[in-house]
Image: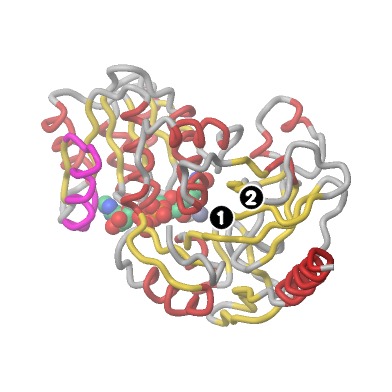
Amino acid sequence: MTLCLNIINHSVKLEMALQENLSVVLHAAGDLRLEQRAIASPRSHEVLLKINSVGICGTDIHFWNDGEGAGFAVNKPVTLGHEFSGTVVKVGSGVQHLKAGDRVAIEPGVPRDNDEFVRNGRYNLSPTCFASGLPPDHGGMCQYYVHDASYCFKIPDSLSFEEGALVEPLSVAIHACRRAEVKIGCKIFICGAGTIGFMNLLVAKAMGAAQVVICDLSSDRLKMAKEMGADYTLKVEKETAVEMAQKVKVALGSMPDITIECTGAEICMQAGIYATRSGGVLALVGLGHEFANIPILHALLREVDIRGVFKYCNTWPVAIDMLAAKMIDVKPLVTHRFALKDALKAFETTKKGLGIKVMLKCDPSHLGQ
Ligand code: NAD
Ligand code: ZN
């Protein structure tokens, strides 16, 4: 009888809890609202997740400010959030590898069709990719969220939910370093000491880079870059791109084999071409404008390969294993935490450029890491 009552109480509590789904919804540029949204039921290949931690990304701020960003436009209300982790609450009938209670990191980009890009192993390039939190697809800045089970990856108990959420920006860096072909002993120039620049620093070092120089406008960020393993830092003042390249060469003792551009600033793209050793690679990660004025002849004559980097592909298992093996430590990147109900304050904090990574804590019973 007691057991039966307990079960009834439990299911009533779950039912009540499931009615609450506070969500961060962007209606249009500048119009970000906290509102309740319906909770979807998982289809056979999906899982219902109780979201724990969600990182706020520069792209979210672009959407909020401009109603667009990264080639996506907000044309109808959309729940933001693409850096997230949580716990499985319910599994669809066809899901074999997950069960209720599993803690997972969520890969937001899910290809919808088995098209040529999926077949050749570059599913990030599929034009039909579903992308949580990138309009028009809803994301994970909410309490409950349904996702394709194949794109939810179990994290071990040794990893925090925040580390699980940081697998997304870490994945950007793993993909960038793979695209740039980072090798043991190479020298690297990273433009931008934001989350993405830091992640590239950590991954490049883990992949065997001998020396990394990183540049930024902010002394505070460069101080942190040093603490996170940068060999040299370059505070950008009023240098031309050629002068920046020269300073990079002096710092490293020779030109870098690889530049990873993580600002989107035109001058950094220019400096990346001038700085990179002949035959090297310039990987473009930062999202700049549609057109850029760059010294293309220098890239041509010195065979500097300019490679685009778009999100990630097959990176979640690698990222989780690297974190679990303590090959890299991403925890210091989380500088601010806010409860989901304070999401607007969290967005303001991110917009002001305070700290590095701002985390939204979506489970009111678990506001820690
Ligand atoms: P962020 O704003 O936290 O960091 C950018 C850093 O660049 C800042 O520290 C800023 O001070 C620095 N910076 C700006 N202009 C500079 C200049 N002229 N010289 C030197 N430093 C300069 O952003 P983030 O989250 O680290 O993201 C970095 C970029 O990567 C953004 O453009 C973002 O949209 C992009 N991004 C791309 C992908 C992709 O798939 N390609 C994925 C995620 C993010
Ligand atoms: Zn992002």
Q: Are marks 1 and 2 in contact (CB under 8 Å)?
A: yes
The range drawn in magenta is: 216-231
Instruction: Indicate left or right for 108 with 247 as reference.
Output: right
Frontmost residue, 350 versus 104: 104
The residue beneath circle 2 is 108
**Secondary structure type for disc 2:** loop
Check disc 1 and give the amino acid type.
Phe
Query: Which badge, 1 or 2, comes first in the chain's sequence?
Result: 1
Question: Which image quadrant for residue 8?
Answer: bottom right
The residue beneath circle 1 is 84
Judge whether 355 appears above or below 44 on screen: below
Q: State the separation of the CA atoms marked 1 and 2.
A: 8 Å
The residue lying at 55 percent from left, 67 percent from top is 362
Q: Can residue 264 be seen in the rendering of this structure?
A: no
Q: Can residue 159 be seen in the rendering of this structure?
A: yes
Judge whether 184 appears above or below 60 on screen: above
Ligand 2: does it lie within 8 Å of the C-beta at label 1?
no
**Image quadrant containing the C terminus:** bottom left
